[in-house]
Image (tube, rainbow, N blue to C red):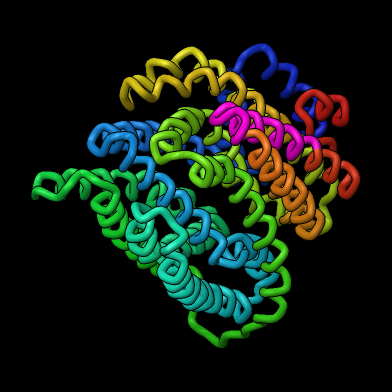
Amino acid sequence: MRFSAATTAGRFLPQRLALRVKPLLGRIDAVLSTADERGEAGRMSLIAFSIRIVSAVIAFVSQVLMARWMGSFEYGIFVLVWVTMVIVGNLACLGFHTSVIRFIPEYSERGMLAELRGIVMTSRLFVLIASTAIAALGALGVWLLSPFIENYYVVPFILGLILLPMIAMSDLVQGLARANSWALFALSPTFLIRPVLILAFMALMLLLGYAPDAKTAIFAAIAATYATTLGQLVGVTSRIDKKIPAGPMKVHFAQWFIVSLPIFLVESFFFLLTNADVLMVGAYMDPDDVAVYFATVKTLALVHFVYFAVKAGVAQRYAQFTHGEPEKLAAFARETVSWTFWPSLAMALMVLVLGEPMLTLFGPDFTSGYPLLFLLVFGVVARAAVGPCESLLTMSGNQNICAAVYAMTLAFNIGLNMVLIPLFGLWGAAMATAFAMIFEAAALSFTVWRKLGIVMAIFLAAKGAA
């Protein structure tokens, strides 16, 4: 069966998906077998979905082993440093890792090869310079503030800043690959190769007699991140050079920066929102508590990856449909809500069933985080129920209002964490995160409806398509 008409897909797909999840995979397979415009996005999403499944397994196994090797205290230190570097590394791109997904398809379709060469080269140089400068300033800041920081965090954070330029470059190269629909090149280095290498380097260092502590883990992460990012950069650059013939280059840096800046704000708020709970737990509680909370959140990766997989596959198609094809954009956007929600719901139920034995693998102390899953899962499912709204807003030129929504949500989340963590500990962090996700989903869905007239909500989307 083909998705031959947007109205047919929008009207009947959600009803069938409501009965069971399996038909969704059949529908996605149907998308992959077609030659229409949805096929490419379907392939990207399915590849991303598959990579996320494998990645979730790899990440879970590696985190279990790291926790077992280091113990909860040292593992908590490593977790806080690693999460911080991933966030800051992403932000160090200043939005270019996402704006290239918007500009490259546009330039390719219009035959603007000079601009295409310009943005590919400029984005790489800019991100490398910006991230290196931020890393240097960060190291200086940690050194100057060391009297006010717990001493067991100072050296790990300074070492962690060595990671920052390569994390930023990895995010940019991932964006370049996604803009060209190279799903494997975009996702496999970060989500498959890097975690395996971190684990392998950590095991090797332990065999060589290094102490099983956070500093050793960070050295392993540095080696793995540099090896992965440089390999990904060489591979993607080689493919781009084959695709784009040599010729003159035009650089419109001011235009690209103006577009990237609101995207940077969106991504900043989104990443901070996604990880604010871990950072806030680290600010208010001990590394042992950080370890328990992070392990609990990691078990939700099986739910999160559905959302990110669909987001990775559809952003480029959103960008293409915004150029004079509002009907196709609306129909396709409604389909992506179903692609996101039903697998997320199924994964959420599975995590609730298997959560306790999964946490036991980290160690006996980690099972105290299991009850938190029942609260956290509400927020994750709420986000999935509206689909990748922020990608739709960003790719359609509404990145400013999207940034405003995330700013409000982040402020709401941090405020709740500051009030609830001192009162309820880890339960307070979980409550703040769940409430913030529900607020985020409602605000984004409402904004899409007001700005684009598209209903992005799982049950309402079917009515909007009718």
Is 165 contained in the magenta span? no
Q: Magenta span: helix, strand or loop, mainly?
A: helix
- In the picture as drawn, the residue positioned furthest to the bottom comes out as 248
Give the magenta part as a residue range.
421-442
Instruction: Give residue 455's quadrant in the image.
Output: top right
* Number of numbered labels in the structure image: 0
The residue lying furthest to the left in this view is 208
Q: Left or right of 236: which side holds 424?
A: right
Q: Is residue 358 left or right of residue 259?
A: left
Q: State the image coordinates of residue 406 (x, y, percent, origin top left).
A: 73, 49
Q: Tell me: 254 left or right of 93.
A: right
The residue lying at 43 percent from left, 16 percent from top is 356
Which of 234/229 is in front? 229
Q: Position of residue 111 (x, y in %)?
A: 65, 73
Q: Which residue occupies 72% across, 56% down?
A: 395
Which percent across, then down, holds residue 225?
A: 34, 57
161 relative to 394, above or below? below
Whether residue 425 is in magenta: the answer is yes
338 vs 88, nearest the viewer: 88
Of 167 and 206, which appears nearest the observer? 206
**Residue at the spot 26% in from the left edge and 59% down from the top edge:** 223
Horizontal relation, residue 306 to residue 128: left or right: right
Picture layout, residue 16 above or below residue 218: above
- The residue shown at (70%, 81%) is 254
Percent coordinates x, y for residue 334 in the rendering: 76, 35
* Position of the C terminus by quadrant: top right
Task: Say if residue 135 shows up in the picture.
Answer: no
Residue 104 visible somewhere in the drawing? yes
Quadrant where the N terminus is found in the figure: top right
